[in-house]
Image (cartoon, helix red, strand yellow):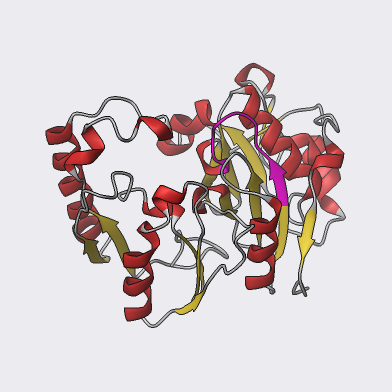
Amino acid sequence: MGTPGEGLGRCSHALIRGVPESLASGEGAGAGLPALDLAKAQREHGVLGGKLRQRLGLQLLELPPEESLPLGPLLGDTAVIQGDTALITRPWSPARRPEVDGVRKALQDLGLRIVEMGDENATLDGTDVLFTGREFFVGLSKWTNHRGAEIVADTFRDFAVSTVPVSGSSHLRGLCGMGGPRTVVAGSSEAAQKAVRMMQLVTVSFCAPGCLVPHLSSCTAEVGTCPTARRLCRSSLMSPWYLCPAQNWRRLELASAPSAWCSAHAPTAEGLDLGIPLVRNRAV
C-alpha cells in the first residue's frame, strides 16, 4: 500500500475519514491549521474520494466523521504501513490518540498485521515517517521522539531506518516527500533544505552528494550528463537518487525540463552528528 513505483509498491485501497464540523470551530488551531471553510472542505473531501476511486481505481474505505476528533481526517498520522504490516502510531497529542481506534479496526479488516506501540514514553506521528522504497527516514520533531523512531526500526527490520532532526513545528513529510521513483521533492525553506541535507548524509540510497539543489539558479545540467553525478555514481552499487526542490515540481510534472537537476557543489556536513541511523537486521 504505497505510491506506485520502483520499491514503493502499489496501492489497492485508500482509507479516508469524513470532515467533522468541529474542525471548523477552531479546535484545529492547536495543530496550526488555518481557519476552515467547512462546506468547501467537505466538497473537496467528496472530490478526493471520487478521484481515488475513479481515477486511480482504488477501493475506498471511508470512516465516518467524529465530532470528538476534529483532526481525525489527518489519517496519515495514525499508522505507518509497509507491505502487510501496519504500525499503529502514538500521536504526540493525547487528544489525538483515540483517532487510531477506527484506523486499527479498518486495517485489521484488510488483513494487515497490526503492531502496537506499547511504550508510553514513545511518541510518533505518521507524517514524520518517509519511506523511499528502500529505507525509512523518521523525523525527530515536536511530534515524534527518538523512542518512536526506534519502534519504527524494530517493526520494519528488513529496512534501514535513519532519524532526521526537524526544526520548527513541521513534520518531516511537510518538508519533503517522494515525487516519484528515485526522486525526493523538497521545499525551498531552510528547514526543508536542512532536512534533506541530513538525509543525504545518512542514507544508504543516495550516492551522489552533488545532487542537492537549494535554488533553481544553481542547476547546471540534465541528469545523466552532470559530470559530478556521473563520477560519484559510477562506482556505487546503489541506484542513484536525486533531491529536487519543490519549486521545480511543475517542470517535473509537465516534462518541460530534466527530470531532476544536479549542482556542482556538494552540501555541507552541517549537523552531521544529529542524524542517527537506526538499523535492525537491514536486508543487503
Residue sitting nearer the eye, 76 or 32:
32
Percent position (x, y) of residue 215? 64, 20
Q: Is residue 92 left or right of residue 167?
A: left
Q: Position of residue 145 (x, y in %)?
A: 66, 49
Residue 9, x across and y down, in percent: 49, 68
Q: Residue at x 50, y 48 (%)?
A: 127
Above or below residue 87? Residue 226 is above
Whether residue 110 appears in magenta in the rendering, the answer is no
The residue sitting at 21% across, 48% down in the picture is: 67
Front residue (pair 19, 260): 19
Whether 171 is among the magenta residues is: yes
Residue occupying the point 32% across, 68% down: 13
Q: Quadrant of residue 78?
A: bottom left
Report whether residue 73 is seen: yes
Q: Quadrant of the N terminus?
A: bottom left
Which portion, as a residue range, is magenta?
A: 163-172
